[in-house]
Image (cartoon, rainbow, N blue to C red):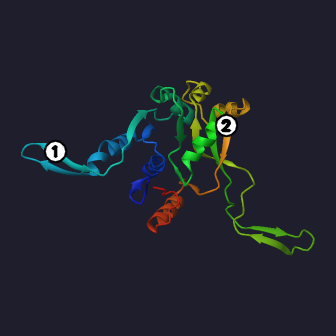
Amino acid sequence: MVEIGGKPIIWHIMKIYSYYGINDFVICCGYKQYVIKEYFANYFLHNSDMTVDLSKGSVEVHSSHSEPWRITMVDTGLNTMTGGRIKRIEPYVKGERFCLTYGDGVSDIDIADTLRKHEQSHAAISMAVYKPEGKFGAVDIDPQTDWVKSFREKPDGDGGWINIGFFVCEPEVFDYIPSDDTVAFEREPLEHLAADGKMHAYRHRGFWKPMDMLRDNKELNQMWNEGRAPWKVW
């Protein structure tokens, strides 16, 4: 619920999916779930023109400016790990293919393309991966003379691709998650899916940024306020 441009980051993430026609959401709630529930429970009224007649105790809605979203908010436990949270929403997915993401990162990822590539792969799960830049400039030094041979400002990290938390999943994924609130989705479930040859990687080369620290929040707000937010595809 930390805000970017006056809207919680979860709103930004949902707007990305909504742009690609996905408007049915299930939110895995835990810590301070009441804040999320109250926000969306009142969202329609806060984004509508309305007349409140206090003498009659009536509310008349004239027009709505809210999104066409259907949102199911599920109490998945206060201390439940990621795998346990996903397992608890299985009844609400109802045996359908679904997209899955964390609530702390934004991207200009093409959701429609992830779905196309996933279907072509015939995998049980597709995971978006990204090759991050290094945090610091890299200096290549001649070991004999100590002369600097080259300098690169913020090169690629260690050459590896990392999980950025945008998934496309088949219902089969639930079979890999035990009914155990201590299971992290990123450990045994994903490791076993990969070992069984059922995981496809979607390489994203555009923009992605997680909001892990206050500095990240400030940078994202600055991008938004300056009108250069790459994730604003809507």
| 1 or 2: tag closer to the N-terminus | 1
Q: Is residue 29 visible?
A: no
Disc 1/disc 2 C-alpha distance (Å): 51 Å
Residue 209 position, x and y percent, is 57, 56
Q: Secondary structure at mark 2?
A: helix
- Badge 2 density bin: few <14, some 14–19, many ≥20, Cα 10 Å: some
* Residue drawn at the location 58% of the way across and 38% of the way down: 168
Q: Quadrant of residue 121?
A: top right
Tag shown at residue 216: none
User: Residue reaching furthest right?
Assistant: 144
The residue indicated by pointer 2 is: 121
Q: Is residue 67 visible?
A: yes
Horizontal side, residue 65 vs residue 137: left or right: left
The residue indicated by pointer 1 is: 59
Residue 78 or residue 125, whichever sits in front: 125
For badge 2, the amino acid type reads Ser
* Residue drawn at the location 38% of the way across and 58% of the way down: 6
Quadrant in the picture for the C terminus: bottom left
* Residue drawn at the location 52% of the way across and 63% of the way down: 219
Single out the mark in the foreground, 1 or 2: 2
Horizontal side, residue 38 vs residue 21: left or right: left
Residue 47 or residue 36, whichever sits in front: 47
